[in-house]
Amino acid sequence: MTQLTKTIEQQLTNHAHNHMIKDLATNTWLTGTDVRSQRDALVAALQHAGVHAGDIVLISLPNGANNIIALYATLALHAVAYTVNPTMPLPELATLIGRHHYGALILGPDHAENSAELATRAHVQLSTSIDDSTAATPVLAISHQPVPTNTLLHDFAQHNPSPVGVLMYTSGTTGDPKAVVLTHGQLFAAAQDVATSQQLTALDRTLVVLPLFHINAQVISVLATTISGGKLVVAQKFSAHRFWRWVQDERITWLSGAPAIIAILLKTRPAQQPAVPTLRFIRSASAPLLPHIQQDFEDYFHVPIIQGYGMTEAASQITVNPLAHPQVGSVGRPTDTDLVILDDNDAPQPAGVTGEIALHGDHVITSYLDPKYQADFRHGWFHTGDVGYLNDEGYLFIVGRKKELINHGGNKISPAEIENVLTQHPAVNQVAVVGLPDDIYGEAVTAAVVLNPGFTGEDTSTEQLRTFATSRLSKFKVPSRFVYVDSLAAGPTGKIQHTRVKRALMAATAH
């Protein structure tokens, strides 16, 4: 057993006769004994399917207790959990299955119902390993698959003393998704960091509303709560209509969210401020949270928002605002992470100087699964591709992605700076600023805008937005073009994917 699995086992014992996980979809509480029983049954089913330590187990379950138990079971076997979107189309899932050699599949209702078609598309043979079993979730064994072995994963495991626990792919906002493998040691270090920095105890109850196939929910919500002895209340998905009732009824003390969730809660605010005395804070990460939205939310609901910064490559958390002294606009201070700001020559920069953010720590990967991406690791540091600066007090401010910076006549422009201004205009619902090819300046600053109801993409709107931006930004930062769209490409947590937006705008321009 590893430190991670030992700690999970201890918490199952501690909660043997107490509530540990509640599934809101079934309105059912599970004790530690219930969780252990279901986990052990699933472990037996996986073993019956032929799963061994180091094998990949694909999990496409919807949010719920079963999903968490599947993670516990896979970790207990020292197998590798690859948790994916349970609603992804079959062709996309078939492509994922063709990417690796799997020990077994644990599929949710949508995918399980179409398992025959999935098998045909993925060129594999599937068989149900358990029917009449105490395990709540069926396991599909793969009796034939074209990929003979996971050579890269085997090589990676051979050079790491801690077993691999989780496989994930980055969102691919600036290029092809990269395979990230996280060891038990990295997952435990990350969960401990979250629990310590957020002062989590056995008295805490968290509401899980983010998708469990995302690193944020897996580590920040599930593993950090588990190792600190708290209780998990799991929603199948976020619901603005039910959110405040959940918080009240379940006596939620904190939760990890995303800026999109906070913005929706603010937009759908009830006429009467909800009474949620147990809620200590809401943690926001996965995308930038605009300062005026945070201020408006805190002023109305009287609930602090603690903004953080994380990524899959760091097993979630990198920085977080201290509970006692948060700074609006900042993603906080490094907690258990070495962080440095580097210039283009990899030289460390002083406070106030913008550069690329680089990391090192017990929870930070030192290589991707595919060694062709090794250029991101230099001199012992992982180069994130994010751009930002530290102030004199050590708080980090994110400027944007290095590859998303717009080069307008030699001026390097941060899309986030412009977006933060434009979203303050009442006409703007969402905006993504990108650089499109320009014969004179290299790249033209272009704003793709989703308008609020009641506004139209007419010349008057463009003129109003341009005037609004001109009064708040340097002239070279003001978009030269505004394009009005119905929606913007976004990842599962609502983070706008600028590369996809840019690609779509360029395709539309070509036509």
Image (cartoon, rainbow, N blue to C red):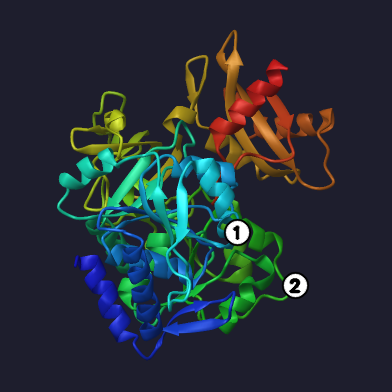
Is the residue 283 above or below the residue 65 in the image? above
Q: Residues within 10 Å of mark 1 (few under 14, many from 20)?
A: few
Nearer the observer, 18 or 43? 43
Q: Is residue 38 visible?
A: yes
Q: Is residue 317 visible?
A: no
Q: Amino acid at mark 2?
A: Ala
Alpha carbons under labels 1 and 2: distance apart: 43 Å
Q: Amino acid at mark 1?
A: Glu
Position of the C terminus, as image quadrant, is top right
- Which label lies toward us, 1 or 2? 1
Nearer the observer, 405 or 73? 73
Give residue 113's mark: 1
Mark 2: secondary structure: loop
Q: Splitting the image into 4 quarters, where does residue 460 fall? A: top right
Q: Splitting the image into 4 quarters, where does residue 418 fall? A: top right
Give residue 271's mark: 2
Q: Position of residue 14 (x, y in %)?
A: 30, 85
What residue do we see at 26% from left, 39% from top? 151
Mark 1: secondary structure: helix
